[in-house]
């Protein structure tokens, strides 16, 4: 329908442009017709348009039948009036074209405004639908791997197993969740992603502590242990890393005390790619 209306405006505009050409042609013919009258000539090649020109002159004569003598030639006002009528039509057609352009602009603006409003409503509904779907994702898993910091690794005075026990004891006390041993790390399963900031507070306390351990912490929403495993295999220490879908899910939490940032895109062993983000503290 919109394309039809634009085509209609284009057709009407083209029609009036064509009529302007016709009127200009008629003006030229009227001038020649007037010259023929002034010279008392008889130009047969004007016969095809004389009926129309004669009618215009008659209309001019009803307005004024006067004349003016100049150097023996009689200039009848009716021809001048007929010429003014044609010139008036020419400028009226210009006005019609301007009006058509204004109407088209109003129509186009109205159509675009309507489409934008329609698109905004659609986007709002889509966003609400996506938000509902994302908020249904409530479960998430945290996998923690540890490693001795370099300054402790060669001294042999730090027992990593004992440090892991202390870490797990702290996490169990703070979260109330018992871990499972998985991929030589510790897997914690949670049920409410909306409260993840509370867990992140605890995890950043661990990372920022004076512990002799480095921590590779991986978080993944849902039950996607495969993606969690791929993330954990990157062994990115002292960061809390997540995949892109988890970062996206975090945006739909009501309150966010942390921000997310992309670390990079990594290639996995299956020649696929994995977009990796991290949680960051606000400075």
Image (cartoon, rainbow, N blue to C red):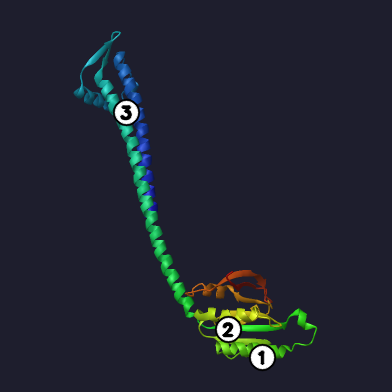
Residue identifier under label 1: 165
Q: Position of residue 15 (x, y in %)?
A: 36, 39
Residue under the point 26% across and 11% down: 69
Disc 1 + disc 2, Cβ < 8 Å: no
Measured Cα–Cα span from mark 1 to mark 2: 19 Å
Q: Position of residue 117 (x, y in %)?
A: 38, 60
Depth check, front residue: 144 or 108: 144
Residue 82, by quadrant, is top left
Image label count? 3
Other-residue count near label 2 (Cα within 10 Å), few / some / many at <14 / 14–19 / ≥20: many
> For this view, does 151 lie left or right of residue 123?
right
Q: Position of residue 92 (x, y in %)?
A: 31, 34
Residue under the point 24% across and 26% down: 55
Residue identifier under label 2: 141
Judged from the image, the secondary structure of the residue bearing numbered disc 1 is: helix
Measured Cα–Cα span from mark 3 to mark 1: 100 Å
Q: Earlier in the sequence, mark 2 or mark 3?
A: 3
Residue identifier under label 3: 87
Residue 93, by quadrant, is top left
């Amino acid at each position: 329908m919109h394309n039809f209306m634009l085509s209609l405006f284009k057709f009407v505009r083209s029609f009036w442009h064509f009529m302007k050409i016709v009127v200009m042609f008629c003006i030229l013919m009227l001038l020649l017709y007037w010259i023929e009258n002034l010279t008392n000539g008889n130009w047969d090649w004007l016969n095809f348009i004389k009926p129309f020109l004669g009618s215009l002159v008659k209309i001019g004569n009803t307005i004024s039948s006067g004349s003016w003598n100049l150097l023996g030639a009689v200039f009848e006002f009716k021809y001048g009036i007929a010429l003014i009528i044609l010139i008036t039509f020419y400028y009226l057609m210009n006005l019609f074209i301007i009006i058509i352009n204004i109407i088209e602009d109003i129509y186009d603006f109205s159509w675009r405004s309507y489409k934008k409003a329609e698109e905004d409503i659609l986007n709002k509904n889509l966003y609400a639908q996506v938000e509902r779907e994302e908020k249904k994702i409530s479960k998430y898993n945290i996998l923690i791997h540890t490693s001795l910091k370099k300054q402790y690794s060669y001294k042999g005075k730090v027992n990593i197993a004992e440090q892991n026990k202390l870490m797990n004891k702290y996490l169990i006390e703070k979260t109330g969740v018992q871990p499972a041993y998985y991929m030589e790390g510790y897997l914690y399963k949670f049920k409410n992603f909306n409260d993840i900031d509370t867990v992140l507070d605890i995890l950043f306390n661990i990372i920022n502590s004076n512990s002799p351990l480095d921590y590779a912490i991986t978080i993944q929403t849902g039950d996607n242990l495969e993606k969690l495993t791929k993330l954990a295999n990157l062994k990115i220490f002292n960061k809390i890393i997540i995949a892109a879908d988890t970062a996206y899910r975090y945006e739909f939490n009501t309150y966010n005390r942390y921000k997310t940032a992309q670390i990079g895109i990594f290639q996995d062993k299956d020649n696929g790619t994995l977009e990796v983000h991290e949680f960051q503290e606000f400075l």
